[in-house]
Image: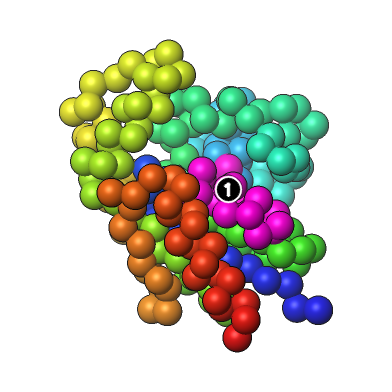
Amino acid sequence: MEKMIVAIDGPAGAGKSSVTRLLAERLGFQFLDTGAMYRAVTLAAIHQGVDLHDEPALQTIATEIEIVFDGEEVFIDGKNSTAAIREPEVTRSVASVANAPSIRSYLVDLQRRIAAQGNFVCEGRDQGTVAFPDSFCKIFLTASPRARAQRRVEQLSLSGKPVEFEAVIRDQEMRDQQDSTREVGRLMKAEDAIELLTDDLTLVEVVSELESIVRQRMEH
Ligand code: DC
């Protein structure tokens, strides 16, 4: 039977990753965090001392490393790298990897191979537009810049790394700019995606809304 894919795209801080995990659990689907793949290649490149603008070298790394997802955890060549891929150095550097067209096409292909194995909720920037344009249900999750930054401040404070709101806003503007101007796979709402603004909604409210949208689609 044809596998089902729910594609969730949106900017950093819109709540995609918590929403994706919870929605997948409710639906009995698996989830795929595609940002983690770009982060994994970036981390491996940093470890190997590779110039992050050397696309052929990045491509060698992308094709040679083994990225394995196990629930919430990410393993690179057998090593648990769940925390390491979220380190600020990786977050600062990942845009050069995500901008490289050959890396994108390799990772999109990998995403399709993984998603062919079951029903998936896939999150990223280009899931509804590039990776899974035929997906039966596409969601574009957004929130205002201030709401997104506020969430980020709260997250970081909970993990013992307090930051200034203004610094987060500046950082976020830079990432938005990078995400929406890259040549390939830029952040864009698919024409047939349903847009949901999450500013005034709790996580559970967002997930419930999306669950009902997906279930309606599944009936048709
Ligand atoms: O969602 P995230 O912050 O973990 O994503 C990390 C980086 O990868 C971010 O710069 C956006 C980019 N990305 C992308 O270009 N395409 C995707 N499908 C997912 C993430």
Residue 73 placement, left or right of 129: right
Q: Quadrant of residue 182?
A: bottom left
Quadrant that contains the C terminus: bottom right
- Of the residues shown, which amino acid type is indicated by label 1? Leu
Q: What percent of the width, then of the height, locates residue 66?
A: 76, 42
Residue at 71% x, 49% y is 63
Q: Quadrant of residue 142?
A: bottom left
- The magenta stretch spans residue 28: yes
Residue indicated by mark 1: 22
Q: Nearer the viewer, residue 86 or 64?
A: 86
The extreme top residue here reads 160
Quadrant that contains the N terminus: bottom right
Residue at 71% x, 57% y is 28
Residue 162 placement, left or right of 102: left
Residue at 53% x, 55% y is 123
The extreme bottom residue here reads 220
* Mark 1 Cβ and ligand 1 under 8 Å apart: no
Residue at 75% x, 78% y is 2
SS label for mark 1 = helix
Q: What percent of the width, then of the height, locates residue 205?
A: 42, 52
Using the image, determine if residue 218 lies above or below residue 44: below
Most common SS among magenta residues:
helix
Q: What percent of the width, then of the height, locates residue 179?
A: 36, 53
Can residue 131 be seen in the rendering of this structure?
Answer: no
Q: Quadrant of residue 96?
A: top left
Q: Decide: few, some or many residues near mark 1? Use Cα within 10 Å; few <14, some 14-19, many ≥20.
A: many
Q: Nearer the viewer, residue 10 or 20?
A: 20
Can residue 81 be seen in the rendering of this structure?
Answer: yes
The extreme left residue here reads 166
Magenta stretch: give its range.
16-36
Using the image, determine if residue 5 lies above or below residue 106: below
